[in-house]
Image (cartoon, rainbow, N blue to C red):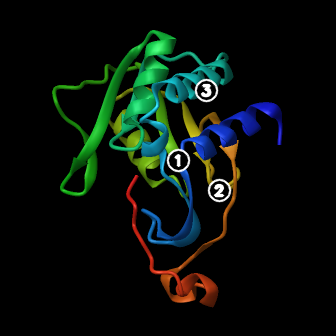
Amino acid sequence: MDTMQQEVLDIFRRTQALLEGHFVLRSGLHSGHFFQCAQVCQHMDAVERLAQLLVCKLASLKFQTVLAPAMGGLVIGQEVARQAKVRFIFAEKENNVLVLRRGFKIAPGERILVVEDVVTRGGRVVECLDIVRKLGGEVAGVAMLVDRSAGQTKFDIPVVSLLEMSFPTYPADAVPEALARIPATKPGS
């Protein structure tokens, strides 16, 4: 682990955002670890530093707007946009599907960076990519704080993450006995 990744992990630990227990992830999979980015987002100095590190890694990508899925990507997405001095918009659930609301628009050819907090399988990122493409925008890339798949989740565009970690995940019917003994919680993102 390089020094930047160690710094990111230290921020998550210091803010108690890396939880241990028995968790049901948004994907429905079970895990003994959970990144609760809302804990990091209480601390604006941590948010500012994480965004600063992310923006440095984005130097080669050109984008005009940051799009983040609500709720998880809101705070980090807005701070990345602020530091990059670009527009910020977000997608939110409507009838259980991510959509643009509140009058947000994407112009044809507009270069969009999708920013998310934690990605395990990438479902919400894919929904955001679909929104951008359907509206005629151009996806510049995806940026995330934590790639829980350790690089296994693939997208057809450039991807930047601050931390790649892979904790085991299990389908509900294949949870190991030791983990199954702990009551499962769904902490939200």
Q: Dividing the picture into quarters, in which one does residue 178 lie?
A: bottom right
The numbered mark, 3 or 1, whose residue comes first in the sequence reads 3
The residue that disc 3 covers is 54
The amino acid pointed to by label 3 is Leu
The residue that disc 1 covers is 118
The residue that disc 2 covers is 149
**Eyeballing the image, is 135 above or below 34?**
above
The amino acid pointed to by label 2 is Ser
Q: Nearer the viewer, residue 183 or 116?
A: 183
Spatial CA distance of label 3 from label 2 is: 18 Å
For mark 2, give the secondary structure. loop
Callouts 3 and 2 close, C-beta under 8 Å: no
Quarter of the image with the N terminus is top right
Q: Residue at x 54, y 87 (%)?
A: 181
Residue 142: percent from left, percent from top: 55, 35
Q: Nearer the viewer, residue 121 or 42?
A: 42
Spatial CA distance of label 1 from label 2 is: 10 Å
